[in-house]
Amino acid sequence: MPLSKQRALAKEMVLTDANEKGPIIAVDGPAASGKGTIARALANHFKLPLMDTGVLYRAVALNLWRWGGDPSSEFEALRACGDIGAEPQDPELRSEPVSKIASMISAYPSVRAALLERQQDFANQPGGAVLDGRDIGTVIAPGAEVKLFVTATAEVRAERRRKELEARGIIAHYEDVLADIRARDERDSSRSVAPLKPADDAIVLDTSTIGPDAAIAEAIKLAEKRLARAMPDLG
């Protein structure tokens, strides 16, 4: 094939790939804020693949727990990143011991670095994606077309988590759950690498006084408005 045609074909392929770029929607926020529910609804509404990045940290935590490893050791936590074999449906991923370990090890810079590339690869796949986490809009996908920061008061989130635990047959006391929520907030917000905070251009959605259906409807409306401005060709 003549060089001129090769160059023309290469240019056409680049343009095609560029046109196939879909939106990245980042959904960040603290525990029990409703961000997971909202992220799933957005992925379904826009027909986009979804990654719950918290599952990655829970999978590492589950590895560490099954090995009898020490969550206070960054070295042992990093070793647990090597073979993440847990299935997303594994009920142990949502257990309280694993949740607490995940919150601890997510503060380690080496653990966050080890999981960074697979999250960014997911975000940048052709067609777009929705990612749910705590540092999506600030670290994983700072160029995301839509950034939502979903939040609620610690008291509201504690009551939601208590009900969730009791629905799973786990006895939970509100005061204990509230203390755990506040401790996680402190760890997530004060860590040196990728602290929990809204991106400068994030839309903050407070779900303290609204139910899941209203929160989802508002999130979809906000995302559609932001996408119409950022990617008008999608319409």
Image (tube, helix red, strand yellow):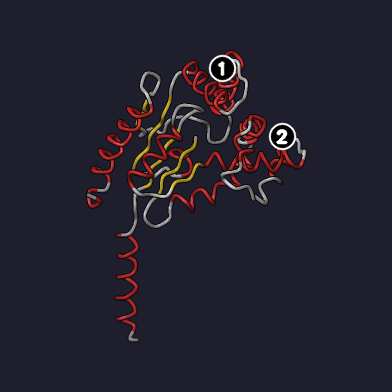
Residue at position x 42%, y 30% in the image: 198
The residue type indicated by label 1 comes to: Leu
Q: Is residue 73 left or right of residue 104?
A: right
Q: Quadrant of residue 126?
A: bottom left
Q: Is residue 15 left or right of residue 37?
A: left
x, y percentage for residue 170? 62, 24
Instruction: Looking at this view, name the residue that lies furthest to the top.
Output: 175
Q: Residue at x 44, y 29 (%)?
A: 34
The picture places residue 95, in percent across and down from the top left corner, at 63, 33
Secondary element at image label 2: loop
Residue 179 lies, in percent from the top left, at 59, 17
What is the number of the mark on residue 16? none
Q: Nearer the viewer, mark 2 or mark 1?
A: 1
Q: Secondary structure at mark 1?
A: helix
Figure quadrant of the N terminus: bottom left
Q: Is residue 63 above or below residue 17?
A: above
Question: Residue 40, position in %: x, y?
Answer: 42, 40
**Which residue: 76% across, 38% down?**
69
To which residue does mark 1 refer? 178
Q: Which residue is mark 2?
A: 71
Few, some or many residues within 10 Å of mark 1 (<14, 14–19, 20+): some
Amino acid bearing label 2: Pro
Relative to 207, say whether 15 is above or below: below
Instruction: Tell me the distance, in whole angstroms, between the alpha carbons under discs 2 and 1.
Output: 22 Å
Closer to us: 21 or 90: 90
Q: Which quadrant would residue 175 be assigned to in this image?
A: top right
Q: Which of 206 and 16 lies nearest the eye of the viewer? A: 206
